[in-house]
Amino acid sequence: MLEVADLIVRYGPVTAVDGVSLTVPDGPFGFGLVGESGSGKTTLGRALVRLVPAAAGTVAYDGQDVLRARGEALRRYRRAVQIVFQDPDSTLDPRMRVGAAVAEGLNAHRIVARDQVRARVASLLQEVGLEPEFAQRLPHQLSGGQRQRVAIARALAVQPALIVLDEPTSALDVTVQARVLALIGELREQRSLSYLLISHNLAVVEQLCERTAVLYLGQVVEEGETALLLGTPAHPYTQALRAAVPDLETGLPTPAPRPQPVDAGGDHAPDDDGAARLHRDHPGGCPFHPRCPLAVDRCRSERPPLREVAGRRVACHRAEEALASPTVAVGSDTAD
Amino acid sequence: MTAVGIGAGRARGVLRRLGHELARNPTLTVGAVVLAIVVVVAIFAPLLAPDPTDAGNATHPLSVLQAPSSAHPFGTDELGRDLLTRVMYGGRTSLQIVVEVLAIAAAIGIPLGLIAGYFGGAVDQVIMRVTDIFLAFPALLLSLAIASVFTPSVGHMILAIAVTWWPWYTRLVRGEAASVVRRPYVESSRTLGVSHARIVARHVLPNAATPVLVQISMDAGGVLLVSAAISFLGLGAQDPTPEWGLMVSQGASYFSTQWWYATFPGIAILITAMAFNLIGDGLRERLDPKRVLSR
Amino acid sequence: MTLEVRNLRVSFGQRTVVAIDALDLGDGEILGLVGESGSGKSITSLSIIGLARSLGATVSGSIKLDGRELTTLGEREWRELRGDRIAMIFQAPISSLNPVMRVGDVFVRALRLHGASRAQARDRARRAMEEVVLSPQLLARYPHQLSGGQAQRVAIAMAVALRARVLLADEPTSALDVTVQAEILSLIGRMRLEEGISVLFVSHDLAVVAGLCDRVAIMRAGQIVESGATAATLRAPATEYGRELIAAVPRLGDAHA
């Protein structure tokens, strides 16, 4: 069980993760982390595997602090929690053969005896749907989907209990994506894994995760059972996200009526693009208020706490109203 | 098929591949061939040279400063020594210098660069500031200054040059290492719990090595010229050691009347330095990642 | 017919990457060109606007814009045509904007290249920005000061200001957040309604295409394997690959977690 409490991660002056708390239970379990660029979801994933330092807050695995662990405790954590990255092209060392890449974790922790390594690598490759012969290949001889499978095998080698999957299929073709997602589902059952699935794609998260948290500008704005969240979203941002997903059957959601451009005042950084967003000082109060159709004065000054509303946790002062009459149009970035 | 047939077939195959290589990368091939000739001559100097003793202490007062002839194709020097022999043996000295300087510089520079690039932070700062101090001096002057402190000899000269050469490799490797360290596959190895040493050895070094290898091959010509210059100024090789730069220096005073003395060693320097440069250029072309991808 | 493509063959050396027998784009129509990576969809759009050759491709066949043959045009003729009749927007709009010029200057320069005076150009730029619902004040910014969505709107505004009849859109929303994507798609839809622009929309995302496009053509390995009215094609694909592609799209609403 992974418990994150009030985690804050900063990149210089920018707060990428701004007080996030969530709990990922033991497996089999899928926890989705949804957000767009600038939400901090990737940073959060990286902080959980200690690739970036946390400024404040705690992360505990099975009750033990993770962020300050050293030596043996750190080694144990590294085996327990693993990560798979988004980009299949840079996720494997181009000069290392597949077999050696998968064996790296095995060797680092001496999980099996030296003469057993080859056999174990072969079985790991088969587990992710690759023939053992792939061990001899170099990454550039593999397709994107195959490389992602190798990355998963690499992570599985150390027998983790939890895997952080950072947009594992976003860079893959849709047919390949479907297969890799199916693989993740199978592995979850076979190994009783839990995973934190980071994605901007609501459909993927719905398919694989029991619970989901929605992030906006580094804060959790809504969290709860996935079906509930996506079926009846309470936070205006979740609603906007849900409404913006184009659907194969019905086509686009009805576009908002043509908004009037507001005169641009002052010199703000654009806010619909994550990188740009990170450079802006956080607006006080609710992070979403500049774009929220329900925003009132209280939203500008008071950061809404996460509270129980209709079976899930929402960080919105007006969650009940939002739930009652869902909004679709959000203020856009046309003039900021 | 007979054994001869198979052998001939193989030989043809090799020749075809060489031809391919030549067509694809004439620069590299020409440079490599010329260098190969120089190396072979240097290695087999004791067998090929007409008067091996002339490379050492022998003197022949009767054949002083003779023009090139069938007996002495490169002429003789002021001690009557056969210059062809001395030029051939000079190749040994020069190649030894180039190899040792580059080996020492690489042995110091590359690990420092890897450590600086991999760990970053304070470690990086300290290493790079020390590197910067060395780089602030013009290399040739610095090596001259260092060489002048010690009794002139080939060995001391090698050290003097190596000491001024390593910082370039550190800087080069550090840049590459710093970029490799950020790549997802290195991050993934860290999260797997792989030790720093293994990551540097198995991931950072191989991926950061290419530019350094190219640089080293391109530097060979430079080292050769620097060592020739230092010997020319009297601070490196000393007589009777045959060294091309020294010979040019010794021949300089006779140049107007006995042109051959300084000329042949000079040509040897020119050809060898050019061969190194061609190899460096050719290697850089060959190892260019864009070319590799399009194959 | 606005755009008529016949027997288009595009190859890099020995490798043929596009082999399209027929592709049509009608007046005021939005056609979706869908495929996975390597299907040749991007190269097809680049060939239509005459940029494939500069990438080293060999292009043969016929591409007619309102009856005028494009494959034989020289560079000077292309310069007049691009922007004026046919425009293209890309996945990363910022990379097609000059980073050292203010956006407004790029805009004005493009308009003046096609014959407007400076005053006319400024005026048209301003009006085009309003069309795409962007404050004209953004024209004073440099490209890196714009968000992805804003930059894409600027690119569309330029196409509108230049009065292009045909817009080639190569994955214009793939790099954008889904909320911004919805707005851009809506904008493109409106441009078609209000200005009558025809759009060739290249995308790997079937769902995006579903909402926006009247017709869809599915590409695979350089060929069009299936095409037809969007709703009908997506509901009942005729080919095995079409079925496979559509089945693979993760859908909201059929959870089995």
Image (cartoon, grey):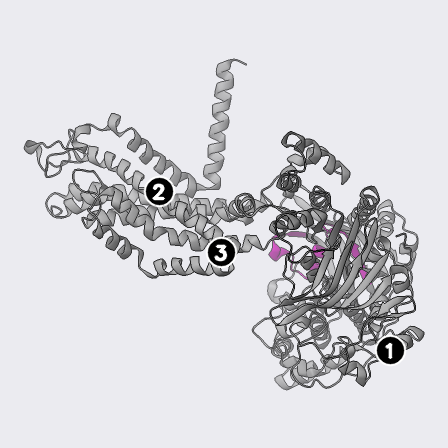
Residue A110 rendering spot, x and y as whole percentages: 64, 38
Mark 2 falls within which chain? B
Ranked by sequence position, the earlier of labels 3 and 2 is: 3
Q: Which residues are magenta?
A: C31-59
Dot 3 alpha-carbon crowd within 10 angstroms: few under 14, some 14 to 19, many 20 or more: some
Mark 3 falls within which chain? B
Asked if badges 3 and 1 are on one and the same chain, I answer no
Any mark on residue B175, and which?
Answer: 3
Any mark on residue B275, and which?
Answer: 2
For residue A117, side relative to residue B51 (left or right):
right
Dot 2 alpha-carbon crowd within 10 angstroms: few under 14, some 14 to 19, many 20 or more: many
Residue B284 rendering spot, x and y as whole percentages: 46, 47
* Mark whose residue sits in front, 1 or 2: 1
Looking at the rendered structure, the kind of residue marked 3 is Gly
The span from disc 3 to disc 2 (Cα, nearest Å) is 28 Å
Q: Depth check: give the residue in front, B205 or C152.
A: B205
Q: Depth check: give the residue in front, B57 or B124.
A: B124
For residue C117, side relative to residue A320 (left or right):
left
* Mark whose residue sits in front, 3 or 2: 3
Any mark on residue A318, and which?
Answer: 1
Asked if badges 3 and 2 are on one and the same chain, I answer yes
For residue A38, side relative to residue B261 (left or right):
right
For residue B167, side relative to residue B153 (left or right):
right
The kind of secondary structure element at disc 3 is: helix
Q: Quadrant of residue C53?
A: bottom right
Q: Quadrant of the C terminus of chain A?
A: bottom right
Looking at the rendered structure, the kind of residue marked 2 is Ala
